[in-house]
Image (cartoon, grey):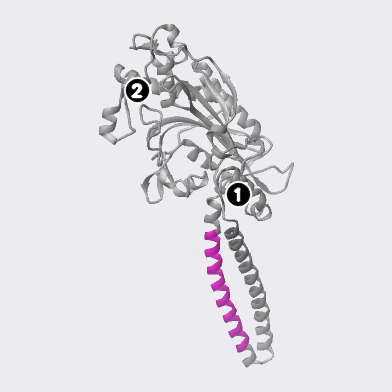
Amino acid sequence: MLDIKFVRENPDAVDAAMANRQTTWDRDRFFALDEERRSVIAEVEKLQATRNTESKNIGALMREGKREEAEAAKEAVRQVNEQIEGLAERRSALDAELNDFMAHLPNIPCDATPVGKDESENPERRRWGTPRDFEAEGFEPKAHWDLGTDLGILDFDRGAKLSGARFTVLAGAGAALDRALQNFFLNTHTARGFKEFIPPVIVNREIMYGTGQLPKFEDDAYHTGEDQFLIPTAEVALTNLHAGEVIDASELPLRYTAGTPCFREEAGSAGRDTRGIIRQHQFTKVEMVKFATPEQSDDELESMVAEAEYILQQLGLPYRVISLCTGDLGFSARQTYDIEVWLPSYNAYKEISSCSNCGDFQARRANIKYRDPENFKGVRLVHTLNGSGLPTGRTMAAIMENYQNADGSITVPEVLRPYMGGMERIG
C-alpha cells in the first residue's frame, strides 16, 4: 500500500506513475475522501475540547449551587457526545472507504524500472547459454506434452478426469523428476544462506491482503472458505511470517525459502499456454523471500536474480534476463526482473522466474517494521522482496525439451542424478 501522506503531497507523481503503468486513479475522489476525513477529525477534536470545558464548568457550577446552570451544561455535554458519536461513525466509514481506495492502488515504479507500455517494451539485460540446434543433430524436437505422453510420465487425460482442465498427473520418472527438482532447489538455496520453511498452504484473508493478492485479485485465488484461501505462492506465507512484528536491524537482511504446492484460478488466462504444464491450476514452486533495509534492498534484488540464474546454470538451461517495464509490472512491485528459459516447442524464451523488489509496499499492508537505534529513533518499514527459485513444472518442461534425444528419451541433467537414484535417462 502506498503512503497516504506521499499521495496527498505528491499527486502529480502518482499521476505520472499510474500513466506509466497504463492505468488510472481517481485523484478527485481521493482528495474528496481525504479532506472530508480530515475535516471530521478536526471537528471531533473541536467538540472534544468543548466537552472538556463544559465538563469542568459543571463541577464549578455545582459547587456554587447553580443547579439549573449545571443541568444546562450537562445537557450541552450530552448533545456534544451525540455529535461526537455521529462523527465517529462517519469517520469509521470514511476510514474504510479510503483504505479500500488505497488498497487498489498499485505500487509506484522506482527509477530503475524502464518506462514502457507493455511486455513488448521489456528490455533484455543478458543471455546465458546457447539453444540446441536440433536441425544440425538431424531430428525434429518434440514438445514436452508429446514427450511426456509418449514416455508415460505426464498424464493429462487422468488429470482432467480427476480435477478438470489444467491439472496433470505426474507418473513414474515424471513424479521423481518433480521431487528431485524441488529438493535440488531447496538444497541449493539453503547451502547459499537461505533459511527453509514449510508453511501452511491455507491462509487467512488478512494474510492474502498483506502481500497484495486481495482485494484486487480475489478472482484469481482458490477459496477454501469465506475468509481462507489456498496460497498462490509461498511468498504469501513467508512474507507474513513477520506481519505485525518489529525486526532488529542487526538481523537484516533475512533470506527465506520454501517449497509448496501453489494454486491459481488463472482467471482471464483462457487460451494462454493451454497445452502442457506451463500454466496449471496446481503446481509446485520453490520461493525466495527477503526482508531488507531500504539501503540493502536494491543489492538484495540483484543477488536474488543471480540465485535463480545459478540454478538454471547448474541445470544447463539457456535463458535470458529482462527488466519489466512500467506497463508490465506486477501490482506490488516497484522493480522486477523476469528470467525466461528457452523452450524449443515455442521457439522462444518463456518466463520461469520473476524476482521483485516491493519496497515498503507490502510491509505497510502487513505492518512489518525494523528498529535501528544506532541510526534513528522509533521504527521504520522494511523492504520486502520475492522471487521464484524455481517452479518445478516449468523447469521440468524445459528439461524435457532441451534434454530430449532422437529416440524420444530424455537425458537427466547431471546435477539431478543423485536425487533420482543415479538415473541418467528417462526412456
Element class at badge 2: helix
| Crowd band around label 1 with a 10 angstrom C-alpha radius: few (<14), some (14–19), many (20+) | many
Q: Residue 227, image x and y in percent?
A: 41, 50
Task: Give the residues drawn in magenta, as a range.
Answer: 71-97
Residue 336 shown left or right of residue 425 in the figure: right
Residue 228 visible within the image: yes
Above-or-below relation of 237 to 182? below
Residue 193 visible within the image: no
- Camera-nearest residue between 363 and 94: 94
Residue 2 shown left or right of residue 173 in the figure: right
Q: Residue 50, image x and y in percent?
A: 66, 77
Element class at badge 1: loop
- Residue that badge 2 annotates: 145
Q: Residue 25, image x and y in percent?
A: 57, 52
- Residue that badge 1 annotates: 2
Q: Amino acid at mark 1?
A: Leu
